[in-house]
Amino acid sequence: MGKYTTIELFAGAGGLALGVEKAGFTTIGAVEFDHDACETLRANRPNWNIYEGDIADLTKLDLKEYYGLSEGELDLLSGGAPCQAFSYAGKRLGFEDTRGTLFYHYAIYLQQLQPKMFLFENVRGLLTHDKGRTYQTMCKVFEAAGYDIQKQILNAWDYDNAQKRERLITIGIRKDLAGKCTFSFPEKCKYKPVLKDVLNEVPESPYTPYGEKKRKLFELVPPGGYWRDIDPALAKEYMKSCWNMGGGRTGILRRMSMNEPSLAVLTSPSQKQTERCHPLEARPFTIRENARIQSFPDDWVFCGSISSQYRQIGNAVPVNLAYHVAQKIYEALDGKQ
């Protein structure tokens, strides 16, 4: 048991929660809608008090009573609500404008439990979503709930992950702790790992193979290459309408190299404009290879169909990125004491 407690919202397969736990926190509750993801959490952490279902049903309850907490007792609320546009009713840009979105329920947790700190993660595109108004509204809600906030875009590659994956991290400190509790974002790690650092002795696991035609094309693509590195006639036949699109289209027939980090792990092993072929074999990454790239430990079990497991891993926050951020939150809470 860690000395600091946390509740995880929109927990998915547990990447963020696992990183937070690794930093020394005790998870007293996790909320998730997807059944397979809940089974994954239960298989790995049966003591996490998993709530499976619509978070809207849970936030109708008295959350302090549900978790057996007094107001302000919880140390950390973490999670990241999916990005949705708000209503801007009367242009108040506040809590009422978020009704009908999943963020609204994150805000209810924050208001009711008043944790000492919160961690809210999302895609970097949230900053510009709806011309920036979505994130602006979220920040107003955080501040109205009684929190001073800090934000920064962090790349997982800078924090012990062999993957380029950017996340917007927002940290909140309850205003009454200002001056007693100081947070600073983690410094970048000195070494930035590449695929050869994580794709050694990976446990066997299933994968969804390419069709024969695509497999033969990928055999022609060198590691680190893409469609421009094969016969233009073959590339044009494969790309069809994409051939006439603008831009570099570097994700099409893209093969990774052992000497580079992976591009962001996807929720599906084969998406035509964002392909990630294995560096040494003409196939997608396996379940366990994707999990390694996301810095999940090899003993973290994923439940459900192969497609569900790919989706759970692709949607997760990289564990080591979460760990480095949570470690700084832990230090901030220690400073409070």
Image (tube, rainbow, N blue to C red):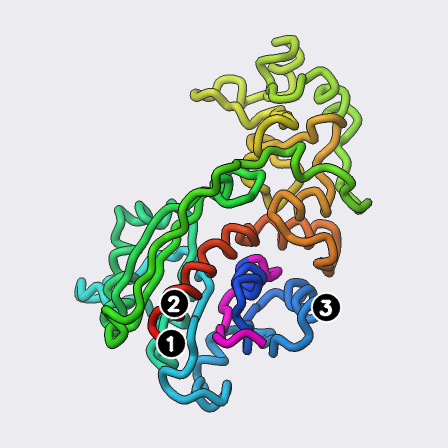
Residue drawn at 51 percent across, 69 percent down: 8
- Which one is nearer the viewer's eye here, 18 or 98? 18
In the rendered structure, the answer to whether residue 202 lies left or right of residue 292 reads right
Q: Disc 3 vs disc 2: Cβ atoms closer than 8 Å? A: no
Q: Could one spot residue 158 in this view of the protein?
A: yes
Gap between marks 3 and 1 measured at Cα = 28 Å
**Disc number for residue 118:** 2
Q: Position of residue 323 (x, y in %)?
A: 52, 56
Residue depicted at x 73% and y 52%: 298
Whether residue 12 can be seen here: no
Q: Residue at x 74, y 26 (%)?
A: 280
User: The N terminus appears in which quarter of the rendering?
Assistant: bottom right
Residue corresponding to mark 3: 43
Q: Is residue 14 magenta?
A: yes
Which type of secondary structure does the marked residue at label 1 adopt? Answer: loop
In this rendering, would 3 be left or right of 96?
right
Say whether marks 1 and 2 touch (CB < 8 Å): yes
Which mark is drawn over residue 166? none
Badge 3 element: helix
Observer-nearest residue: 171 or 101? 171
Residue 115: mark: 1
Quadrant showing the C terminus: bottom left
Q: CA distance from mark 3 to mark 2?
A: 26 Å
- Three-letter amino acid code at disc 3? Ala
Q: Residue at x 69, y 75 (%)?
A: 46
